[in-house]
C-alpha cells in the first residue's frame, strides 16, 4: 500500500492550516450606533430637523482669497528638464492660480452647485450636509441610493452624474432617489473635536442619515474613502444595505495579500493578460505606491502639521490638492506640465479647492487617514460581506485587484467591469461610463435579490 512521505503530509497540513488561519473571520466589533460626536455636550444640539441649505461664495471670501493669491511669494521654478516628476510644476501652477483669480466665476459655480436641493441635519451631534435629488420621472421602481465621496472631495464630485440618475434610462425599469452626503469634516459637513471618528463610525452616521430621510434599507455607491465606508456599512449592516457599487473595489483581507504574492509567480494565470500590468510585476506596483503615498503617511500620522500650511496658503492648498488629483487621473503623465490634471475640467478642480478653502476643512478632512488605520478598522476589513456587490475598475485607479481576490471580501460579486479609460475621480472624469455601469450593476443586483427587498 502506497504511503505519502511524512514530509509531504506535514507540508500539506501546514499549508491547510495556514490557509485556514488566513481565511478565519473575526467577530465584528461592538459599535455604538448613537455615539455623540458633537462639540457641545449631548442634548444641547439634539435636533432632528432637516433644514434647507444654500451654498454661497460671498464677496468677502472671494476678495480675501484673491488678495492672498495675488500676494503669494515667488514660486521656485522646476529643475531643468523636469516637468511634474518632482510634484506640481510651478509654471503650470502659476497659470492655474491666475485663472482662479481672473477667470474662475465664483458666483456661477456656486449657482451651478445650487441647482440641486441642499440640506443640513444634525446626526449624533454633527451638522451633516447632503444633497437630495428625487426622481424627475415616475418609474416602476425607485431605488434609494446613497453616494459617498472620498478625499479631498465633497458632494460636489457627483454634480455631473446626479441628473443622469434621477432620469429613467432606456432599457431599465427603475430610477434613483439620490442622497449625496458630505462626510463629517468634509465640504459643508461639520467635523468632530473628538478622536475616533473612523470610517466605521462615519458609516454609522451615514446609516443614521438615511434613516433620517426615511430609508431603513437602501443601496450605496462609493469611491476612495467613500468606498471603504460603504464596504464597512455592507459588512456591519447587511440587512440594511440592499446592494453596493464601488469604483475602488479592494479586499484588504490577509488571504488577499497572500493571493497577490502567490499570483506574482504565475501572473498570466491569475489575471487576465490584458490587465496583468496593473498589478504585476509587484516591484513596479510597489515602486508606484512608494512614490505616490508620501501624503498618505503624513496625513495618517501628522495631519494637523501639514494642515497649518495648507490652511494658511490658498496657493499651497491648490498645489497640494491639484497634484494629488492629477496623479490619480493619469499617473503616466508626470512627464507633462499638468501632470495628469488636464484629464479633469479645471473648474471642477477649482470647485473642489474652493469648497475646502471656504469651509477651512483641509485639517478635519485629512484626519480620516489617521483615524482609518486603527485596529477596529483592520478587524472589519477582514470580515467578508454577503451584500451583492458590483465593481468597476478604471484604468488609473489607485490599486487594481482581479476578481478572484475581490471575492475574498465580496462573497457575492455579481458584476465586475474593467475599463481602459478613466481614473480615481470617476464621477468627474468619466461620468458617462460610471453611470452606464451603475445602471447595469443595479439591474443585476435587483435580479440577484429577486426584487424581494425593494422599498
Image (cartoon, rainbow, N blue to C red):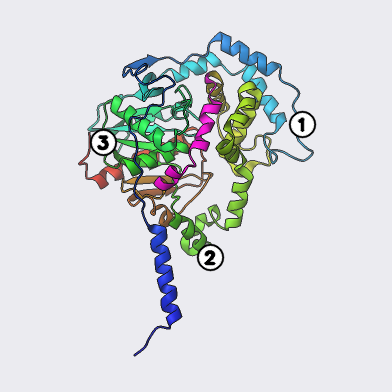
Q: Is residue 105 above or below residue 421?
A: above
Magenta stretch, residue numbers: 359-380
Q: Which is more foreground, mark 2 or mark 3?
A: 2
Q: Is residue 423 above or below residue 104?
A: below
Residue 423's x, y, as percent? Answer: 52, 40
Q: Report whether 207 appears left or right of 159.
A: left
Question: In the rendered structure, does residue 183 fall within the stretch colored magenta?
Answer: no
Instruction: Give the residue furthest to the right.
Output: 80
Instruction: Give the residue furthest to the bottom.
Output: 1
The quarter of the rendered structure image containing the C terminus is top left
Determine which quarter of the picture holds residue 236: top left
Give the numbered dot on residue 265: 2
Q: Residues within 10 Å of mark 2 (few under 14, many from 20)?
A: few
Q: Residues within 10 Å of mark 3 (few under 14, many from 20)?
A: few
Residue at coordinates 68% horizontally, 38% vertically from top-left? 336
Counting residues from the start of the chain, the first of labels 2 and 1 encountered is 1
Q: For the residues marked 3 and 1, what is the alpha-carbon distance in whole angstroms?
A: 56 Å
Give the numbered dot on residue 173: 3
Counting residues from the start of the chain, the first of labels 2 and 3 encountered is 3
Looking at the image, which is closer to me, 87 or 29? 29
Give the numbered dot on residue 63: none
The quarter of the rendered structure image containing the N terminus is bottom left
Q: Residues within 10 Å of mark 1 (few under 14, many from 20)?
A: few
Residue 274's x, y, as percent? Answer: 51, 56
Residue named by callout 1: 77
Amino acid at each position: 500500500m502506497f504511503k505519502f512521505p511524512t514530509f509531504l503530509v506535514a507540508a500539506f497540513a501546514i499549508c491547510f492550516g495556514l490557509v485556514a488561519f488566513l481565511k478565519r473571520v473575526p467577530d465584528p466589533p461592538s459599535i455604538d450606533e448613537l455615539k455623540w460626536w458633537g462639540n457641545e455636550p449631548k442634548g444641547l444640539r439634539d435636533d432632528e430637523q432637516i433644514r434647507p441649505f444654500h451654498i454661497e461664495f460671498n464677496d468677502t471670501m472671494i476678495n480675501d482669497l484673491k488678495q492672498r493669491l495675488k500676494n503669494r511669494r515667488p514660486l521656485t521654478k522646476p529643475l531643468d528638464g523636469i516637468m511634474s516628476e518632482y510634484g506640481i510644476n510651478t509654471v503650470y501652477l502659476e497659470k492655474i492660480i491666475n485663472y482662479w483669480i481672473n477667470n474662475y466665476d465664483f458666483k456661477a459655480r456656486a449657482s451651478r452647485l445650487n441647482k440641486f436641493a441642499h440640506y443640513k441635519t444634525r446626526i449624533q451631534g454633527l451638522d451633516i450636509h447632503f444633497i437630495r435629488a428625487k426622481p424627475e420621472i415616475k418609474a416602476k421602481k425607485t431605488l434609494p441610493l446613497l453616494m459617498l465621496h472620498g478625499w479631498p472631495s465633497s458632494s460636489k464630485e457627483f454634480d455631473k452624474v446626479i441628473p443622469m440618475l434621477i432620469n429613467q434610462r432606456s432599457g431599465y425599469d427603475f430610477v434613483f432617489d439620490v442622497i449625496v452626503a458630505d462626510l463629517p469634516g468634509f465640504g459643508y459637513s461639520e467635523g468632530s473635536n473628538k478622536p475616533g471618528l473612523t470610517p466605521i463610525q462615519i458609516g454609522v452616521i451615514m446609516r443614521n442619515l438615511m434613516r433620517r430621510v426615511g430609508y431603513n434599507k437602501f443601496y450605496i455607491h462609493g469611491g476612495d474613502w467613500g468606498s471603504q465606508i460603504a464596504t464597512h456599512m455592507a459588512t456591519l449592516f447587511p440587512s440594511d444595505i440592499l446592494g453596493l457599487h464601488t469604483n475602488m473595489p479592494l479586499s484588504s483581507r490577509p488571504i488577499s495579500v497572500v493571493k497577490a504574492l502567490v499570483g506574482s509567480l504565475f501572473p498570466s494565470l491569475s489575471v487576465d493578460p490584458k490587465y496583468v500590468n496593473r498589478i504585476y510585476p509587484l516591484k513596479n506596483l510597489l515602486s508606484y505606491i512608494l512614490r505616490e503615498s508620501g501624503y498618505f503617511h503624513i496625513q495618517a500620522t501628522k495631519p494637523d502639521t501639514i494642515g497649518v500650511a495648507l490652511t494658511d496658503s490658498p496657493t499651497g492648498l491648490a498645489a497640494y490638492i491639484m497634484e494629488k488629483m492629477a496623479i490619480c487621473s493619469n499617473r503616466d503623465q508626470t512627464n507633462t506640465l499638468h501632470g495628469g490634471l488636464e484629464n479633469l475640467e479645471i473648474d471642477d478642480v477649482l470647485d473642489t479647492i474652493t469648497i475646502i478653502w471656504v469651509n477651512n476643512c483641509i485639517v478635519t478632512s485629512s484626519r480620516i487617514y489617521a483615524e482609518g488605520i486603527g485596529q477596529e478598522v483592520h478587524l472589519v476589513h477582514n470580515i467578508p460581506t454577503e451584500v451583492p456587490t458590483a465593481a468597476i475598475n478604471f484604468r488609473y485607479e489607485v490599486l487594481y485587484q482581479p476578481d478572484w481576490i475581490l471575492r475574498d471580501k465580496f462573497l457575492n460579486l455579481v458584476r465586475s467591469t474593467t475599463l481602459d479609460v478613466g481614473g480615481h475621480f470617476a464621477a468627474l472624469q468619466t461620468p458617462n461610463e460610471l453611470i452606464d455601469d451603475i445602471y447595469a450593476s443595479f439591474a443585476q443586483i435587483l435580479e440577484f435579490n429577486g426584487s424581494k427587498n425593494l422599498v
